[in-house]
Image: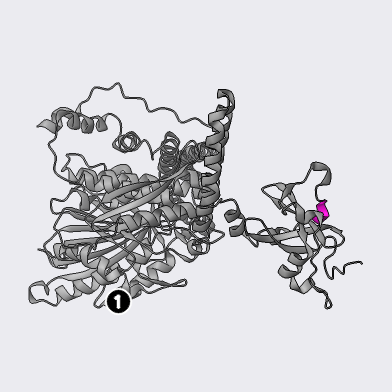
Amino acid sequence: MTTDFGGVKKDVSILIERSNGTQHQALVTTIEQPNTVNCEWFEQDDIKGKGVSLNMVFKLNPHLMPKNFKPQNLKSEADNMSRKSVMITSGSRLKKENKIPLAVRRAEPSSRSESRLPTAKSTSLSKNRRTELITKKEPTVRNIDKIESERIERRENQAKMRYQRDQIKAKHDINDAQWEFAEMIEDWRDENPSRPPHHKRMEHKINVCVRKRPLNKKETKNKETDVVTRSGDLLYVHQPMTKVDLTKYLENMPFRFDYVFDLEDDNRKVYEYTAKPLVESIFRGSRATCFAYGQTGSGKTHTMGGEFSGKNQNCSNGIYAFAAEDVFKKLRQPMYQHLKLTVSFFEIYANKVFDLLNGSQRLRILEDKQGKIRVVGLVDQVVETVDDVINVLREGSRCRTSGQTSANSNSSRSHAVFQLSLLTPGRKAHEERTHGMFSLIDLAGNERGADTMSSDRITRQEGADINKSLLALKECIRAMGKDALHVPFRGSTLTKVLRDSFIGEDSKTCMIATLSPGFSSCENTINTLRYADRVKGLSVNEKRDLEDLMEEITLEENTEEDSCLDMLATQNADQFTPQMLAITKAQDEQQTAEDNAMTAINESTPAFLDALSKWQEYWESVASDKNADVQEILRECETDFDNLEAAIKNMRKLAKVAFEKAENVDAVLAGNNEPKPAQKSSKPRGGINRRLK
């Protein structure tokens, strides 16, 4: 009698039960009368097979059972084999078209993992059996069995570890490539619960604080992990590391600063502990400076200028506006009613200064006979209310230079300087002198050279200018904290403008380091913290020795600007590379040559205009007077020709030098020229006597 197998046919996927109780899908290969179904499946890159009784198939797959089926009490040859799984030889492997689809094989990952885990009972019985056999065997055989038992135990442990790893991975997003580091960071935070900060206002010459922003939309979309943790007054950066054997681990780097602000701290709270004490100092006649430093896209403009809503900025809730609000509150007091407040807003881009309140008009930085730095042509606008200040900020922010970088689509590519100046009447009529000044600076985002090497020429040149000015700023703050005899303010245009804030006895500085907490910004975050840590770590008064003094004296060997650059390169070798030094020097030479050429043109223009005016008069006299002495007029013109020819020759020479310097910059940026090492001057050091007097 032929058995009706219903829906069980060749190449049909059915659910079977293994001898250890696990169930999974298998593919029917043959059907044997009266009630045996042979099937095969994949397991650990091998093909296994088994004969299953028809009763068991219909029990597990009731949808394949025919309507008139009745359980039969027939025993086939497959039943007598106790239904054990067997390996399929290479000759009887499944065909490619008969393989179980990937989706089906992924359906039961936990069951496959569990199938590799033997039960405690079977493990103990097998170990006892192996122990009895080892005592009766030869030493060589016993060693082989020992190796095999160790292999089995090792594989069991590996299977358990894989199972645990799969369980942990299942808690994270399938697209999170750094889920292992995320799990390590979570474990570290569980073991080291964070403590609340103890913020209190402190009076220091230099204050350094750190602010961490939330993950932005791009970082959240990319499933990035937050690698920055605040605990009390400490800040930890969890740097992902990988050993030579590809083992992953974390390096938890601690940093300590005056103030540490986390995600829940808004601009108002940051202002209360950073810039507000400096507002009070300028009414005592001090020069105060507050600047935001950090990677592009880390929240500097958000902190200084105000919060963003899309591309629109609310200028009323930034440190600029908060400082102006407190200044007006102080001005209402009777003891300060004689003071007047003016504001100025300018940017420094590519070592050039542009007035943001005068249509980005270029300004010149000059030094007067008293040795003070003057920004020629800068507009100082008188303001009466906070709304006037906010309008000034909006007008200036629209003119600020921005560009696209790898980290930020709308990155500020210039240093924005917003100054609040308190003026008091002078001794003479209509004369005013500065009582105090507060400079609030939104620095351009610092970038690693490796991040800009694939960019165009302009972006690389911008990056070199930005990094040079940031390093010069750091050295100036360090020198101010040590009360050094020499402050290298000539190292960049930014430090030239802020010179009075560095050399004054009552000068105060506050630095706000902004951090990007994402996994992709980890290296930039560490660089920012090291920059801030070095500024604060050397801000205490230390004993000066002869070696420090000789280091400052060597700055006078060549010109002071070149010495400042050499000092930056020497003290910041890890950030100020020889290539960056060569680019910076080439750019400075180009700018000097261009300024010389334009100065010559500007100085020669009146002579040309006077000559043209004279020639016009000569022509009119000749046209109206028939007896005019034309020969005498031509001699006068010839004298003008000689003078103008000399001026043209000089301008042409200076323009040629500027063209050559521009070509040198292009060559250095392209990497065609190796930067020449700085040579020490053979001149005797003549500055030591002047300094020791």
Give the percent coordinates (x, y) of residue 15: 72, 64
* Residue 6 lies in quadrant: bottom right
Give the percent coordinates (x, y) of residue 323: 24, 69
Tell me which amino acid carries mark 1. Answer: Asp
Reading the image, the residue beneath label 1 is: 388
Q: Relative to residue 499, is residue 586 drawn left or right?
A: right
Q: Is residue 98 magenta?
A: yes
Give the percent coordinates (x, y) of residue 507: 17, 54
Quick one: 269 or 173, which is closer to the camera?
A: 173
Q: In percent of the image, x 25 and y 78: which residue is there?
A: 385
Give the percent coordinates (x, y) of residue 547: 19, 28
For this orientation, the residue located farthest to the left is: 335
Q: Is residue 605 visible?
A: yes
Q: Which residues are magenta?
A: 95-99
Quick one: 246 or 171, which is closer to the camera?
A: 171
* Residue 286 lies in quadrant: bottom left
